[in-house]
């Protein structure tokens, strides 16, 4: 199988990720932070090691300001629902995933908040930073922006907003689901106050991992309360990080594997990873440009490694089924949990075929994928 669905979950992982999960589960899989025996200490050290690696990758001064979550959706909900209060206004974009949109819809349905959704200016989903800043109001408490679109791969202006928002004392949440492990993300220089990330996409960790960085001047209401191993006699959930956002037993084998994934990225270098992915999407874009019946919704520049396209006369799901059954190529069709993006791109009836190469894909696989797509498009005659 040629796996080109890395924007959903990356596959394969570096060998060290498999080895680390296996070894950890076999040798020291105790509960961290609950006991002081040797195995529990080893487990806690392993969790801390992954926090340290993530802090290095995102330039986070204090690794304890990172909480582990099961995925990016939990992290985004914790940030959005934990921060907003009655009367707050939020600015976000039409390119966001339902993990951002649905919590906002829910808070508005309850009559608590209002929001403004900034529209893209092109069919690639380009968002202009000035449109986001223009939408800010006197009661805006939060701006939420993805680092890049999970439909088209287009990089959003997440690097350009932090300084202005900080001056206006507006919290700034970046959904780094598509960018973490591919795009530069530096919470200090970009003045990002909260960063939500999945562990299972380009950070190359196992499913069931993710996290939320919260700047130390932000206190979130914890949407889960429970055991933390700390302050057990207090009836109120701890308000210090990471316990504030880490209730219950952590996914320690997953976190161990995530650490190995992040270490692979640190060793290889974001620039090198980006260069490899760029080579793949440049070639795919080049091969598919100008082909009759194929319409491209991604441009290769300023892209986190996605080529989205439609084939005239064929639904995206049907095309993906043919790619799977006849050519053994895995891609994702449909709407990618990003309904507003598809409305803006006018693809809400057929969806798009999303091809998302990962670091381990090869140029040969890209050539074969391009040949297969062209064959499918030609069959529509
Ligand atoms: C931009 C974006 N945000 C949020 C998510 C949700 O991530 P998770 O599945 O880890 O909750 C995704 C997943 O595809 C995504 O692409």
Image: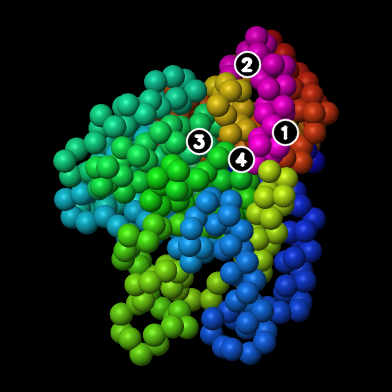
Q: Which mark is residue 276?
A: 1
Mark 4 and mark 1 residues within 8 Å of each other at the beta carbon: no
| Distance CA(mark 3)–CA(mark 2) | 23 Å
At label 3, counting other C-alpha atoms closer than 10 Å, the crowd grade (few under 14, some 14-19, many 20 or more) is many
Q: Residue at x 79, y 24 (%)?
A: 367
User: Sequence-wise, which precedes: disc 3 or disc 1?
Assistant: 3
User: Sequence-wise, which precedes: disc 3 or disc 2?
Assistant: 3
Observer-nearest of 126 and 40: 40
**Residue stretch in magenta:** 270-296
| Distance CA(mark 4)–CA(mark 1) | 10 Å
| Residue 239 higher or lower than 141, as above or below | below
When asked about the image quadrant of residue 81, the answer is: bottom left
Query: Residue 113: image x %, image y %?
Result: 21, 49
- Residue hosting label 3: 148
Query: Residue 174: image x %, image y %?
Result: 43, 45
Q: Residue at x 48, y 66 (%)?
A: 64
User: Sequence-wise, which precedes: disc 2 or disc 4?
Assistant: 4
Q: Which mark is residue 294?
A: 2
Mark 3 and mark 1 residues within 8 Å of each other at the beta carbon: no
Image quadrant containing the N terminus = top right
The reply, left or right, for residue 105 in relation to residue 279 is left
Per the picture, the main secondary structure of the magenta-coloured stretch is: helix
| Distance CA(mark 3)–CA(mark 1) | 18 Å
Q: Secondary structure at mark 3?
A: loop
Q: Is residue 287 magenta?
A: yes
Q: Is mark 3 within 8 Å of ligand 1?
A: yes
Q: Which mark is residue 182?
A: 4
The reply, left or right, for residue 329 in relation to residue 339 is right
């Amino acid at each position: 199988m040629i796996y080109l669905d890395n924007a959903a979950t990356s596959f394969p992982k570096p060998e060290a990720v498999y080895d680390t999960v296996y070894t950890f589960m076999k040798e020291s899989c105790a509960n961290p932070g609950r006991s002081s025996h040797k195995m529990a200490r080893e487990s806690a050290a392993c969790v801390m090691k992954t926090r340290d690696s993530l802090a290095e990758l995102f330039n986070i001064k204090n690794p304890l300001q990172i909480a582990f979550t099961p995925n990016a959706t939990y992290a985004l909900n914790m940030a959005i629902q934990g921060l907003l209060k009655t009367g707050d206004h939020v600015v976000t974009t039409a390119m966001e995933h339902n993990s951002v949109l649905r919590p906002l819809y829910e808070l508005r349905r309850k009559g608590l908040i209002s929001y403004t959704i900034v529209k893209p200016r092109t069919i690639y989903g380009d968002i202009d930073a000035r449109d986001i800043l223009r939408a800010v109001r006197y009661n805006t408490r939060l701006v939420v922006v993805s680092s890049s679109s999970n439909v088209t791969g287009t990089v959003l202006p997440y690097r350009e907003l932090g300084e202005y928002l900080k001056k206006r004392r507006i919290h700034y949440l970046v959904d780094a689901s598509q960018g973490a492990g591919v795009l530069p993300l530096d919470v200090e220089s970009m003045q990002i106050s909260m960063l939500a990330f999945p562990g299972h996409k380009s950070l190359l960790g196992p499913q069931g991992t993710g996290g939320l960085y919260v700047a130390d001047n932000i206190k979130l209401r914890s949407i889960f309360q429970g055991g933390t191993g700390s302050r057990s006699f207090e009836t109120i959930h701890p308000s210090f990080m990471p316990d504030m956002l880490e209730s219950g037993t952590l996914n320690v084998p997953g976190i161990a594997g995530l650490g190995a994934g992040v270490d692979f990225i640190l060793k290889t270098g974001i620039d090198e990873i980006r260069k490899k992915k760029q080579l793949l999407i440049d070639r795919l874009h080049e091969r598919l440009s100008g082909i009759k019946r194929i319409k491209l919704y991604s441009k290769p520049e300023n892209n986190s490694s996605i080529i989205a396209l439609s084939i005239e006369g064929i639904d995206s799901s049907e095309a993906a089924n043919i790619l799977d059954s006849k050519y053994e190529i895995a891609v994702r069709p449909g709407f990618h949990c990003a309904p507003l993006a598809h409305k803006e791109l006018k693809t809400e009836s057929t969806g798009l075929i999303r091809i998302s190469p990962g670091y381990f894909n090869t140029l040969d696989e890209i050539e074969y994928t391009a040949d297969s797509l062209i064959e499918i498009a030609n069959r529509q005659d």
